[in-house]
Structure formats: structure tokens, C-alpha cells
Image (cartoon, rainbow, N blue to C red):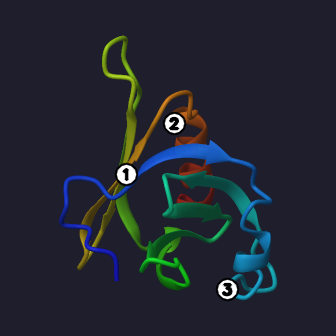
Amino acid sequence: MIDFSNDSVFKLKKVDSTKFDSEMSNILIDDEHVVGCYQDVRDHVVFTNKRVIAVNVQGITGKKRDYTMLPYSKITAYSIETAGTFDIESELDLFYSGVGRVRFEFRGSSDILEIGRIIARYALK
């Protein structure tokens, strides 16, 4: 499992949502679909209509991967922080009972408000 006790896990940038289709095809369930993908250098986060999938790419070759599943149904609270003039990173904090806070940082022009709407759409059902 990814160590979420660090200040933040990823510094993410939006990528084409089809980039990880082949990788996700073995993980997603029948009625689940990808709604957004974000990546840093090697690691990535995939938002689906059911959960957040954080992928930690490990090793020199990157063949070993850790998949951490964070279901929206288990979120107890969440927070989004938009980028400012000098602080160009935005942040998403998800709070899970038993896990605590999970923080994702987004670089550049990532639309953190859209990410917040995704979380709200599926977590507040």
C-alpha cells in the first residue's frame, strides 16, 4: 500500500484518459469507467465512477506496481485547494476512516474544481 503518511503522494498533471486503458482493463469492474487520469513522472492516479486508483510504479523497469484502491463510498470528508498566483499547485485531500488523510497535489493547469465535482458526484450518492 502506498505510504499516505507523507505530506503528499503525487504531483500530478492531467493526461489523456485513454492512456491507461489496457492497464485498467484488468482492474475495473463491469459497470465502472474512467472519468479522469493524472500522472507524475512514473506514478499515476485514475479516477473512476467508483473509486480512486493510485498506482505506484516501482523498480528500475517499472514492471512492479502497487495499486491502492480508495473507494468514494468510504470518504468521510474531502477538501480541495485551488492554485494561487505564486503557489501554482492545487491540492485534493481525501479523509478515510482508518487511513486518515490522503493528499494529492496537482501541477499546472489541472482543474481541481472539476476533480472536486467528480468526488462530489460519486461520494455524495
- Give the Cα distance between marks 3 and 1: 25 Å
Q: Could you tell which of marks 2 and 3 lies nearer the N-terminus? A: 3
* Residue indicated by mark 1: 78
Q: Nearer the viewer, residue 84 or 72?
A: 84
**Mark 2 against mark 3, which lies toward the viewer?**
3
Q: Could you tell me the amino acid type at mark 2?
A: Ile
Q: Vertical placement of 81 versus 64: above or below?
A: above
Q: Secondary structure at mark 3?
A: loop
From the viewer's perspective, is residue 56 above or below residue 87?
below
Question: Which residue sits at x=63%, y=71%?
Answer: 50
Count of picture labels: 3
Give the residue drawn at x 26%, y 68%. 4
At label 3, counting other C-alpha atoms closer than 10 Å, the crowd grade (few under 14, some 14-19, many 20 or more) is few
Task: Give the image location of residue 93, x and y in percent.
Answer: 34, 51
Q: Is residue 70 left or right of residue 2?
A: right
Looking at the rendered structure, the secondary structure element under dot 2 is helix
Residue 27 circle label:
3
